[in-house]
Image (tube, helix red, strand yellow):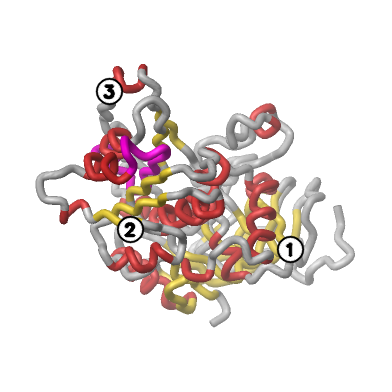
Amino acid sequence: MESKNESSTAGKIIRCKAAIGRKPGEPLSIEEIEVDPPKAGEVRIKILCTSVCHTDIAFWKFTTGPAAKFPIIYGHEAVGLVESIGEYVEEVREGDLVVPVFRANCGECGECKSTKSNTCSKSGIPQGFMPRDGTSRFRDKNGEAVYSFLFVSSFTEYTVVDIVHVVKLNHEMPVDKACLLSCGVSTGFGAAYKLAAVEEGSTVAIFGLGVVGLAVAEGARLCKASKIIGIDINEEKFELGKKFGVTDFINPGALGDKTVSQVIKEMTAGGADYCFECIGLASVIEEAFSSSREGWGKTVILGMVMPGTPLSLSGFELLRGRSVCGSLFGGLKPKTDLPLLAQKYLNKELHLDDFITHQVSFIDINKAFELLLEGKSLRCIIWMDR
């Protein structure tokens, strides 16, 4: 499909700057790379801004295993403009505002058509290459292929993404707020608003008040939960949490001989209707499960637990009605749900502004990593043109 507004770079290799990871845990290197034109079913995007997520940090630290591939371009929270499109791409055109997302949504497979999950059979496990042909669209200055990350790779001025990972948004959406919707905020908000579908008057407990946890609170607030309890060892998060609807706070380190679950049961007369684990620790998942109400309490796991970590839950309590589920991307189907979230923001229903605590230029991307590692930021917007 040929656009009437085809860019001057369409069909050509683009040379641009990218932040490349060459060794685990070491600062990213700003280098010149070549970005190939999109092939069939792909979109080349000019990144406007991006941000660092804890998932980027986790993979950046890996020293072994299939995730430890180098050189690599990390980043999966971003927003940009379509620069050019490959053959058979019809749902976006040059100049469209889009967010790339790690969760695929082809809209055609049985999984996408089902209301039971947000999986997509068109997407497999990220292997560091484009999903359709298993090759890279990036090369460094020596001609060596550079791996992609989670189907997105946003720490670059231009990236190529499969159309099943691209969501078109209204141009009225501020780009820095649009960036937030491509991972963490949507994950937390969707988990409360769509996956758990928190009912009005429900009690909610959130373990971990990072971006995902605060977004859970925002979703629960819009669902009109009666009590939203935030659990975090960082008491500086407590005042911030109030902006997103958190009504009560627990510091696990200040409870003396009591456990978090005991305190929550006292606060809720038996346990929270919904518990959300947003840290990724087996011990916290177990405590969240124990904090849920007997008979119908639901625990939603949002934190990324290390593979192979054992989890111990009471089979008797499961039989008595408590339940546990996991969620990627908060149960949201990107192509249909993200435009709705953007509209909620434009309608002043969804609170996004306070998730952004810092802003830096692309050349200072390592500063964004430092801020997140030090617990000083929620989201640091990284501007490509500043």
User: Which residue occupies 40% across, 51% down?
Assistant: 228
First-in-chain label (3 vs 1): 1
First-in-chain label (3 vs 2): 2
Q: Please tell me whether mark 2 or mark 1 is closer to you in this view.
A: 1
Q: Quadrant of residue 306?
A: top left
User: Which residue occupies 34% across, 56% down?
Assistant: 248
First-in-chain label (2 vs 1): 2
Residue 289: x and y in percent read 32, 34
Residue under circle 2?
23
Q: Nearer the viewer, residue 40 or 54?
A: 54
Residue under circle 3?
314
Left or right position of 6 against 243: right
Residue most extreme to the right = 4
- SS state under label 3: loop
Residue 360: x and y in percent read 45, 78
Label ID, residue 170: 1
Left or right position of 153 against 106: left
Give the residue type at disc 3.
Ser
- SS state under label 1: loop
- SS state under label 2: loop
User: Which residue occupies 53% across, 50% down?
Assistant: 224
Alpha-carbon span between mark 3 and mark 1: 47 Å
Q: Please tell me whether mark 3 or mark 2 is closer to you in this view.
A: 3
Left or right position of 85 against 70: right
Give the residue type at disc 1.
Asn
Q: Nearer the viewer, residue 237 or 374?
A: 237
Is residue 146 visible in this depiction of the protein?
no
Give the residue type at disc 2.
Lys
Dot 1: within a 10 Å radius of its alpha carbon, few (fewer than 14), some, or many (20 or more) residues? Answer: some
